Amino acid sequence: MTNMYSHGSESLIKQAREIQESELQKFYIRLIKLLQGKEHGHETIDSLERLRLILSATKYTRTLPPELQKRLLLLLSSPVEQLQVLSSAVLRETLPLAGQAVNYGQDSNSPLNSHTAALLLLQAQSRDDLSALCTQLLRSLENRPSEGPADLLALTLPIVNTILTHSPESLTEDNMTLLSKKLVDWLRYASTTQGGGASSGGFFTGSRSRQPLPIAELDGTVSGDFFTVLCVGQGFTEDQWMNVYSFSMLRHWLLTFHSVPVGTIADADDRSEIDGSVVSMVSVTSSSSRLLPPKERIREKAFQYCQRLIEQSDRKAQKKTDTDLQKACLVEAVCILDCVCMEDASFVYRVFPCIKALFGRLSSDLSFARVLLPVAQFYLNHGELAAVDCDCVWNLVFGRFPAELFNDPFLAHELLRFLRLNLETAPLRVPQYTCYFPNLLKFLAWDSPAVIDDFIDLLPSMVTLGTALELLHTLLDLPCISATLLLQLRSMCLPISDSGGRSLALMDAFRNPSFRGFFLFLLRGEAGTGDTIDRLSTLLELLSEAADWPRVVQCAQTVPILLHIFFNTVITMADRTLLSQVLLVLLERSSLLLNIPKYITEIHRVFSCQLLKMCKLHPSLVIDQSHELLEFAGATSNVYSKQEIYTHVVFLLGEYLSVSYDSRCSVRLITSCFETLEAVLFEITSSAPPPGAGCPAPRVITTLMSALAKLASRSHDLIPRVSLFLSKLRNVSRRGSVSWCDDEEDLVSIVTLGQELCALLKTPGVAQSVLNPPVHVTTPQWHQDTNVAMPLQLRALTRLTQAHTSHAQHTPTSPAPDTST
C-alpha cells in the first residue's frame, strides 16, 4: 500500500515540526523584509508557502509577530490572487492579535473579498462576534455604491447567508429589519435600464450598445415591468446584480425571518433612502404596501417578484441556456411562494390561481417534470385550504413520472426527496399514495444503489393491511421488474430483428402477444390488480436469460435489505390474519424466484429468520397453517433444495405444535405431524441423495430428530416409535460409512444426539420438562435473575474454578514434600 505522502513531503513536514524557536524568529524577520518590498516575487511566495506548512504541521496554534500579521492582512487586498490565498491560509492557522483583526470598512486597507470573508467568519468565535460582524456588514449597505468598496455588496449577502445557516440567532432585530428593507429595495426597485459596461456573463447575455437601453425579456422584447433575474441586457448595474443575489437567498431569508421574532416596527420610513437616486423616487410614489411592517412587506414583494418570474417563464427564450434558467427560476419561485403561504395563509387565495395556471401549462410536457415537483409540494401544503381537486397532480407525479421517467436520475432524486420530506403528510393527504408503490419501485428496480437509502425510509409508509401481500410479491419480483424495464427501453431503440443482440430470445418473448400480459403486469402503475402472476414459473423461466445482467444482479442485492424492513413493519401491525397470509406467501415463493443463486440463498435466509420471528410472536400461526407447513415439511425435495427454510419449518412444528401454545392442538394433529417428519427422516437416512444433490445438512437431520422427540414427549404413544427409529439409526452408523453423511464427525454428533434423546425418552416425565419447558422457565432466564439463588451459586462456582486454576498455574513443578511425618 502506498503512503499518503511521498518521502520528500514527509521530510518537509518533519522539518516543519522540529524547527527551533530561534530559527523561526529569524524566518519571521526575513519574511517581514520581503513583504515590505513593493513587488513580491517567487521568493516571497515560497516563503509564504513554507510558513503555511510550519503553522499547519504543528498541533497547536501559533501567534505571529504583530508586524508580520499586519503585512499579511495587507496582502488580503493584493491584486495577485495567489498572495490573497496564501495570506488567508496563513492567517487562518494563527491566533489574531488584539487590534489586528481583519477590517474591511470604508477606510480599510483590506477591502472585502472571498478570502477576507472566509477569514472574517473564522475569526468570529462567538455569537456576539457574529452579531457585531452582521451589524458592521449591514451598516455598510446603507452607503451609496460609489461610497463603499467595489466588492462589498457582492460579498455581503453570501456572508450574511452563511451566518443565517449556522447561527440565525446572531442577527439582531435591527439587523433583520434593515436587511429586509434592503432586500425589498433590490428585488422590487432595481434599475430598469441596462448598465453602460459590457455584460459580465453569468445569468445574463445580450448585444452591445453604446447608449443605455431598457432591459429586455428573454424573447428579445423590451421589458415593461420591473427588473428580475430573467431580464437581459448588455451590462448591469450594481443594484441589478444585487437583485440577483437577493433572489438567490430570498427563500432562506423568509424562513429565517419567519422563525425569529421581530417586533412590528412602525414603517413610516420603511425604505432605506438612497439620496438623489431613481430608486428613491419610485419608492416614494409606490405606497400600496409602504406602511406594512417589515415581515408583511417582504412577503408582499416576494409574491410580486415570483408572479413576474412565472409570467416571464412563459416567454420563448432565444437560447437553450436561458430555457434552463427559466426552469430553475420557476422552481425557486414556486418554493418561495410556498414559504410565503406557509407563513401567511391569506396569500393562499392570491397565489393558488397562479400555481394552478402554471400546472395546467406545464403538465403535458415531461421536460418540466422537476419543475412540477415544487408545484406538487404547494398542492400538498395548501390544496386542502384552497379546497381544490389535487388528483390530477398526484396522477401525474406518482403515475406518469415514474412510469415514463424511471431512468432519469435527477428526477428520481427529487421525487424521492419530495416523498421523504413529506413522509408523515403524504400518506394522509394523498389517499392513493400507497396504491402507487409499483410505480415508485421502478426507480429502485432501475438504479438500486442510488436510491436504496430513500426506500429504506419510504418502504414502511407503503405497507398497509391492503397492500402488504402485493408489496411482498413485488419486492420479490424486483429483479424481474429491472429486467423488464431494460427490455422496454431496448425494444424502443432496437429493430425488431437484431441478429447481434445477446437478448434476442428474451426480446422476442417481450414482443410476443401471448406473453405480453406477464410484462404488462410487472410494469403496472398501480396496485390492486392482483397479488402475483398465475403462471409465475413461466415468467421466471423466460427471464432466466437476464439473471446475469449487471443491473438485474445489482437490484437483486438490495431485495434482502428491503424484505427485512417490510417484515419488521408487518410484525408491528400485530395482525395475525395478515401474518398467516404472509406465511403462506413465504412457503409459496421460496421456490418461485429468479434464478440467481446468491439471490435465492439470501432470500431463503431472510424467509427463515422472519418465519421464526412471526411464529414466536404468534405461536398459533403454526396451528392456523399446519396443513401447509406439514405439506412443505413432507416434501423430501425441500431437504436438498431449501435446507435453510426447511430446517426452520421443522423446528417450528416441533416447538409450537403443542397444547401449551394453542388449545386446538390435538393428539391427531401431533401424530400426523410425527408421521410426516418420520417418513422424511427415514427416506433421507435410508437412501443416497438424488443425482446432482449433496448430502443433507447435518442440521436438517438433527432438527428432525429433535422435533420427533418433542412430539413424542407430548403424545407418549409415539415414544416407542421414535426410540426404535433412533436405535436403528445408531446400528446403521456402526456398520461404517453411510451414503447420507460424508463427514465422520457429523455422523458421530448425529448418533450422540440420538443416544441422548433415547435416554431422555425412557423417562417421559423428564423428557416432557426438558424438551417442552414451560414459558415461565425459559423466559426469565434464571441464571440472570438476581432475585434467586442461582446467580450466587454460579458466581461461587466461578470463583472456585478460577482459584483452582490460579493455584494450579503457580504450583511448583518440584516433587511434593514428604508428609509422612
Image: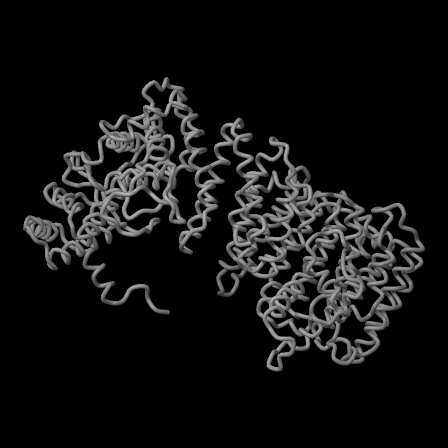
Q: Camera-side residue: 807 or 352?
A: 352
Residue 266 falls left or right of residue 462: left
Tell me if residue 73 comes above or below residue 86 in the rendering.
above
How many labels sit on residues? 0
Q: In which quarter of the image is the C terminus?
A: bottom right
Tell me if residue 39 comes above or below residue 509 in the rendering.
above
Q: Where is residue 636 in the image (x, y as percent from the top left)?
A: 82, 70
Q: Camera-side residue: 377 or 290?
A: 290
Q: Position of residue 699 (x, y in %)?
A: 73, 66
Q: Quadrant of the N terminus?
A: bottom left
Note whether residue 786 is visible: no
Q: Where is residue 43 in the image (x, y as percent from the top left)?
A: 10, 58
In which quadrant of the rendered view does residue 643 lie?
bottom right
In which quadrant of the rendered view does residue 519 lie?
bottom right
Note whether residue 796 is visible: yes
Q: Which colour scheme is used?
A: one colour
Q: Camera-side residue: 631 or 396?
A: 396
Residue drawn where x is 22% and y is 35% of the image: 145
Residue drawn where x is 91% and y is 60% of the image: 672
Q: Where is residue 22 in the image (x, y as percent from the top left)?
A: 10, 51
Residue drawn where x is 63% and y is 45% of the image: 394
Residue 271 falls left or right of residue 95: right
